Amino acid sequence: MRYAMAVDTKKCVGCSDCVVACQTENNVPIGYCRDWVVEVMDGTYPQLEIELRSERCNHCENAPCVRCCPTGASHIVDGGIVLVKPNKCIGCGACIASCPYDARYPHPKGYVDKCTFCVHRVSQGMKPACVSVCPTKCMYFGDLDDPNSDVSMVLKKRKYKTLIPEAGTKPHLYFLI
Amino acid sequence: MATRRQFIRISAMGAGAVMAGAAGLRLLASEITDGRKASYVALTGRTPTYCEVCFWKCAGWVYRDDKGSIQKIIGNSEDLNCNGRLCPRGTGGVGMYHDEDRLRKPLIRTEERGMQSFREATWEEAFDYIAEKIKVISAEHGPECIALFTHGSGGKYFSTLLRALGSPHIAAPSYAQCRGPREVAFQTTFGEALDSPEPLDIRDTRCLVLIGSHLGENMHNGQVQEMSDAIDKGATIITVDPRFSTAAGKSKYWLPIKPATDLALLLAWINVIITEELYDKPYVEKYTYGFEYLKEHVKNMTPEWAYGITTIDPTVIRETAREMANASPAVIVHPGRHVTWYGDDTQRLRAVAILNALLGSWGRRGGFFRTETFELPEPPHPAYPTPKRTWRTEFPDLYKLADTVLANGVCDATVPDPSRNCKFQGWIVNGTNLMETLPNQANTLKAIQELQLLVVIDTMPMEITGWADVVLPECTYLERYDDLRVGPHRKPQIALRAPAAKPMHDTKPAFYMARELAKRLGVIEYFPFEKMEDQLDWQLKQVGSSLEEMKKIGVKTFDRTADNLFFYPDEDVEFYTATGKIELYSTALEGAGFDPMPKYTAHEEPPAGYYRLNYGRAPMHTFSRTANNPNLTDLMDENSVWVNPRVAKEWGLSTGQYVHLVNQDGKRSEFPIKVRVTERIRWDSVYMVHGFGHQEKKLRRSYGKGASDTNLITKVLVDPVMGGTGMRGNFVTFITDLAGEEVVS
């Protein structure tokens, strides 16, 4: 089982609902976030293009944050979800420095926090909070090993990219382009 | 835009600087032991609601944590307005409840207006004070000299109170400051206003045309969702906007129009569609009136004519007109919502309505559907007394097609004027921050100083509450019952709002306030039920449901009772116009002395060194009411002024720099605003998101953050047809030397 997410940049309007929904679902303190929206604009007036992306932890198969963690707090669980055990985390920040996607932040309680793909929801058969709330339905989630999952189906149908592929992290966050 | 960079900056301030008091972290030590559980919050029960953060009123479920505190709000999947998905403001509605700057107790003013000196009062005292003043005003001037300004659910109860007292003066800024011109344009064309949510079948459209409507930045939830569905299905989107909006970024065609010239483009489109015979001939023949007049009227309004005005290439005008015709009747020329721009707005929206009529989209799949609203019995009460005077008598021969009280009209008629014999003496302001809602703030303040009574009902200390005589703190929508939401939509549907928590602080629902005042003013018979929940249960039982049932399901959908969602083929349709047809040539406008068909008139252009001030929405904020919401401020805590790189170069501006803006009348922004140099804006205009630059210091998170566009709108272009206040005729320039001024950031 390999959980993955695909974000349709053609539909995302950058409203940041995913950010608030994550905060209220996961008790992320105000001022911090596990997911965020990036806007990339290209061209000169009036020949312009814009890409909007809801970003979060890429849940990499080859996760530098897990490899560099001195205590084993950063680990990968079933389904390929990268998690942090707060009680094992010493807040050294090595993982923050090693993450090419800037997906981790130091939680005010002293440990490093990040997106969990809402494992507590996913294990109950629900979608992550960001996926369920998105007004544009621009996010697809599921198991890459299941050819009929939402994410497998959409990746078959559409062109996509990953971020910073040259880092060799084998990310599980795809962007439909 | 919530970028990671921004959040890193915020988080770098350290825990001490993080906004206190909001949702907070409620983790038990045992939960922290496992990363899987670290974020898990035990939830105890859910309560149905419909959202009050904006006017879309999406239905959802409010969840509480194990301590009974409101934790999250999730959309109700049965709801036609949101389909189970709230927008960021609805999701962030929790912040409205947790905001520590909320009004906490009734307040009575102790010094002159605007001095911000209040004392806390008991509810009894506050009600007695208001009732006494209302009695005096009614005796001396008549009850009709009391007006209500309202936005949102609570307005219903104060409206009942005013009608019971004999005042017809219930004004909603959502009319003359927002969608009024559109409603009049569609009434005069199709015989019906569009209302809210608009009956647009966007999900099945093949072509969506947006004119200055920045869907996706305005999070009109159902429409944003359906636009996304339409994108999935490969619909063509055509966006007309001087700014490269989010929607423009999703469009096949973006027409970067010169501001204030939209009507010329619309007329040229009509010209192409008629000249090339692209219109829906059987539809036009069967349903419309005045086609020959229209054909003659637009014959010279060619794309080449429009090019000189709009700067849009004639080839593109023709190509886009053909795109629309190819999709016909599954095409929507979007009517927009905030359309009070240049003072000829009714006529511009008439052109939009005419274009839709020619394309045959009204009453057709992928165009406009026929809505149905649920018919709910009202609690029995005596008939309202007939008012002795109405605002109309004070504005003879003006705004003849306005079908509702104008908020700006009431404001104007509060300032003494020898031409008027009535003057408003008392205002009740519910849920609308008039200082940021009405243009020309100086005029609003002048009117306020003339009042004998100003009561403000709100959940937050807004600018307008600072001017009140009495402030009544309302509990948020998450802490109260309100009337059922009844539609309109594709099917009749009702939604319940029930309290998910006890009112925080000493706050009360508007229903309670209005009823207590009714008691004191001798009109209690208009409020037959003592408690809102009893009224709801009585109403629901009349229609085969109950409060108990609705608490379990939140929304209930019924079958349509009237006609089909769309016209049947060859259906004989009677339109509510004088001719019974869709009026391409408007007899109502002609009868009132206005152009029966829209004409383009040139609008004033910015003088050298000045730029047209355009404003709009951000998806995470509603008007000026959410700027202090901890969850939403976290996503966007100030606005910026968008400047084209060419302009920036001329002025030596760079992104992140703070400037003041000053308008054509010398009005300077109250606070400096951050510059955003971007290709996304034309060189002849600047843009900012509305709702920032709060001057109320009690709004601790948002005070002084960014600038207020309303502050800079001193010139108002009034629509003669219906009194709408056009707000896009103001021009600003930059003051780059802040002379040591401190920037709140």
Image (spheres, rainbow, N blue to C red):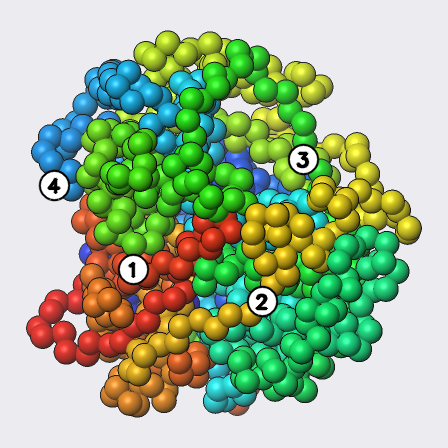
- Residue B592 in the image, given as x and y percentages of width and height: 57, 48
Distance from label 2 to label 1 (Cα)?
A: 26 Å
**Is residue B734 something that shows in the picture?**
yes
Task: Name the amino acid type tagged 3.
Answer: Thr
Disc 4 vs disc 2: which is toward the camera? 2
What residue is pinned by disc 2?
Answer: B599
- Residue B94 in the image, given as x and y percentages of width and height: 41, 43
- Which residue lies at the image location 41% right of the left edge and 12% below the top edge? B523
User: Which disc number belongs to residue B115?
Assistant: 4
Foreground residue among B586 and B504: B586
**Chain of residue at mark 1:** B
Q: Secondary structure at mark 1?
A: loop
**Chain of residue at mark 2:** B
User: Which disc number belongs to residue B373?
Assistant: 3
- Which residue lies at the image location 27% right of the left edge and 52% below the top edge? B441
What residue is pinned by disc 1?
Answer: B714
